[in-house]
Every structure is written in structure tokens, then in C-alpha cells.
Amino acid sequence: MRSAAIALFLIASLVSGSGSGSVSANHEVVRGVSPEEQHLYRPIVDEVTGKKTWRCLSDPTIELSYDQINDDYCDCPDGSDEPGTNACPYTISRKFYCANKHHIPEYIENYKLNDGVCDYDICCDGSDEYLSGKCEDKCKQVHDQFESYKARVTTEVDESLKIKVQWEETADKLRQQAINKLSELRATFIAKQKQFEIVKQTLEETSDEENSGDEFLLAQVDRLNHHLTEFQNDIQLKDKYIAQLEQILAKLVDNYNPNFNDAAVKESVAGFQEYITNKDSGAGAGAGAGIDQIQSVADELKQYSLQISSHSETETPQVVQVPTFGNMLRHYYGQLRDAVNFEQNTYLNNNDNGNGNRNPILYKYEKELEDIGLEIETIELDLEKNYGPKDILRALKSTWVNTKIGDYMYKLGFLDAIYQGNNLIGRFDGFSSNQMTYSNGAKCWNGPSRSAIVNLVCGPSNGIVSVSEPEKCQYVFELITPIACQPVTEEGLLSTFQVDLSKL
Ligand code: MAN
């Protein structure tokens, strides 16, 4: 059925071309079609008969009389013959164009046409109700509302962007610091590794030298022992002879006849008595050549030990005691061994003693290298993580947002974790397209570990706006934050702008 009223809006061709079937350049404006698409509705004018026709846009095999456009009857399968009515079923690609002079052109769904409702939020010019004409043009008021919204949002977003830029700068500095630290650590690691190799090699060489020093020391001690034994045997033998002589002379003193005036006997007796008296007083007990010999070897040994001590790194004062006789020699050797640097000594003894013990110097180096290696790895991993555009989250490393929603206090740490009261909802996982993810939270009773998605929305400061739990223990947060702010665009503003119908 073709409505007579709708037929009034049919487009007439203004210009007919010469010859047959030429497309008219000028034609009346077709309702519901934007100026950019008007050319699609040019009539085909038969040059002989002057008859105007038109073809469906998606199916040019269907040719219609030109007055079938907007005649309130759907002829084309794609609905393209009815851009200004709701005769064809609605498709998203075929919306009615509202010019909205004084504001911004818009497109409205065809089922909202002529339904008695003024859809000023879309068609502020009221053109959606063109049949009744009941909706006056309110585009000026709507535009004023839009302008004040634009001013408010622009100011707010500009403020937010200043904060965002500061965070980006902080993040950049922190990243640079991390990069510098990384190169320092890598350089330290390489230097330490070289030192380690040198020390290892030196210790191996020192080990050989010190072993030969040890052998020398042992030989000296053996020499000392040998002389001492000889000396002791000599002394014992002499003591035996002396004892025999003293017995002979004691008999002489007891048994001689003092009445015989034998001067030689009397002199010997007097001399022996004087010897006994002096002997008891302890005088004349010289050590003799044997002692000198032992003393000389002991001195040599002492000098050697002091030399070693002066080369050692030990902080402990090196006190070397000259041994007394006998088995004290072994003790003396022990003292010398103790005087040798502990670390070197340990290396000599324990470098690879088959018990798995490691040399303390090398162990110290290995431990330091391991610690530096771990630190390097941690920084490398940190630098690889996605902390958002320009690494911005790095600036919020220790920032927490606390908001009470419903029964719970929610605590959100940007690169840390989210808590619901004392329940761990999850630990920071990553960032992608204005979304942070947190996972591996506390296990849900009869369910998975808690986790969360945090959607970031532009706002002048950080704050949790809402939390929902669409699946058990899987949470969705909405967080306003300057991080999500972008410079204002007309398009962006229009998509968020809402007309206050009560003020029109
Ligand atoms: C707590 C909260 C809830 C969760 C249940 C699951 O009550 O963490 O969010 O749904 O545990 O048992």
C-alpha cells in the first residue's frame, strides 16, 4: 500500500538528461538521507520518455519507479527505498538522518519515526516526528547544554591529564632508574666474575706455593726434633757419667784418711765439696752447643712463620710462641699453621676435600654473584612487564585505593593486590586496554581462586566506583583514575553527552 501522505515526499527529478537512461545530476533532497549520501538517490531519466527510475542500492537488478522512494512501502530487500519512513524493517545500517541544524547531525532508528515521541536526545530538531510536526526544533537549547558539558568535561579532563603527565614523568624516571641500576648491576656482575676468576686462579697458584712452604716448615721441624733428640741423649749420657764420677768422688770424700798429709787428695776432696755446694745452688747449668743449635733452628722457624703472617689477610694479631723443649715442638708447628691466613689455609685444606666444602673466599664470591644475578633477573622481569602506556602504573607502585562498598572494605594496590576485607582477591597480573587483571587470590569455598578485572575509567583521582561479582569469586571493578584519561575530542564528548530533557 502506498500512502498518499508519504507520496507527497517523493522526490522529483529536476533535470532530465538527453538520450536514453542518463542519471540526473540535480534532484530534490530525499528525506532521511544525509547530504553525503544524497547522490545515491539520483533518478535515472529516460531520455526518450522522460520517465524517472531508480535501483535498489544493494540489488541494482530491481528497478523502481522513482516515486516509489519513501512511498511508505518497502520495495527493496535492503530497505534502501524507504530511508525516510519506517516501512522497511529496521537495520542498523539504515537509520534516519536528522540534520539538527545549530547542533550536530544524528541518525535515529526508523522505528522511532512518527511514533509520537520527541526524541530530542537524538533529533533535537524534532524531524523524527515530521508527519505531525509536533516537535519544535530545540537544537539551540540542546547545543547550549552540550557546550556547558563540553566546558566542564574539558576542564576536568585537562586537570586529570596534568596528573597523568606527572605520573608518566615519574614512571619514566623510575624506569630509567631501573635501567641504570640494571646496567650497574650487569657491570658489577661482570667485574665480580672476573675478580672471582682471578682469585680462584691465584688461590690455586698460592695453594702450590703454600704447599711447598708447608713442606719446608715440616722439614725444619723434623730437623729441630732430630737435634733435640740427639741433644737429649747426649745430656742423658753425660748425666750418667757425671753421676758415676760423683759417686767415685763421694766415696773418696767419705773414705780418705785425713791423717795422711797428701796435698793432692786433700785438694780433690775440697774441690769436690765446693762442686757439690755450687751444684745445689744451680749455677753453671749451661745449655751448650746443642741448645744453641736448637735455638737457631727455632729462630729460623719463627722468622718464616712471621713472614707468612705478614702476608696473610687475617685481622687476628699473629703471636708466635717459641716452643719449649720436647714435644712442645709440635705445638710450635701448630702455632705456625694457625698463623697462616685462615681463608688461604682453609682453601689449602678444603679447596676440594671431597666433602663438598667450598673455599670461603670463593663461596663469598659465588654468593655475591648469585645475589647480583637474582637482582638483575628481578629488574629484567619488572622491565618486561606491561605497566600500561608509558609504563604509567610504575608511578603508582605503592598507591592504594580504599573504598567501602556494601559489607566490605575493598583495598586496591595498583601493582600489588586487591583485598575484600581480609580476603585476598588477587595479585596484580597485568595491564591491557584500560584494564588491570588480578589473579591467584584466596580460594573460594567450593570454587576457584578469587580473581578480578579492573576497568579503568577517566576521572580526576583514583577511586573504586563499583564492584560486581558476575561469577562466583570473579570480580569486576570500575575504577576512576587519571590513567584512563585522553584528550577530549568532539566525538568522545558526543558519545558521553546526555541531553537533560527536563531543561528543554
Ligand atoms: C565471601 C565473599 C564473597 C564470595 C563468597 C564465596 O563471602 O568473598 O564475595 O562470593 O565468600 O563463598
Image (cartoon, grey):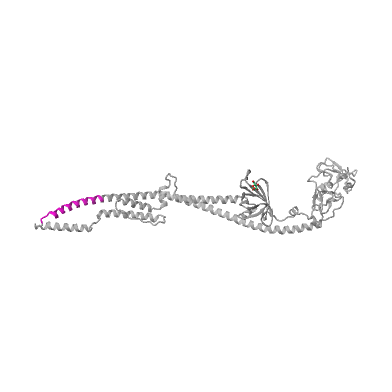
Residue at x-position 41% and y-position 52%: 342
Q: Is residue 359 magenta?
A: no
Residue 158 x %, y %: 70, 58
Query: Which one is in front, 89 or 289?
Result: 89
Magenta stretch: includes residue 241: yes
**Percent coordinates x, y for residue 257 in the rendering:** 10, 55
458 left or right of 99 in image: left
The quarter in which the C terminus is drawn is: bottom right
Is residue 203 visible in the rendered image? The answer is yes
Q: Measuring 40% from the left and 49% from the top, which residue is drawn there?
A: 348
> For this view, does 402 lie left or right of residue 42?
left
Is residue 205 visible in the rendered image? The answer is no
The majority secondary structure of the magenta stretch comes to helix
- Left or right? Give the position of 155 relative to 60: left
Q: Position of residue 490 (x, y in %)?
A: 75, 55
Question: Residue at point 28% right, 49% down?
Answer: 226
Q: How far across and how far down the image is residue 21, in percent?
A: 86, 43
Residue at horizontal 60%, vertical 57%?
173
What range of the chain is rendered magenta?
232-257
Instruction: Indicate left or right for 133 with 234 as reference.
Output: right
Total labels: the figure holds 0
Question: Picture quarter containing residue 74?
Answer: top right
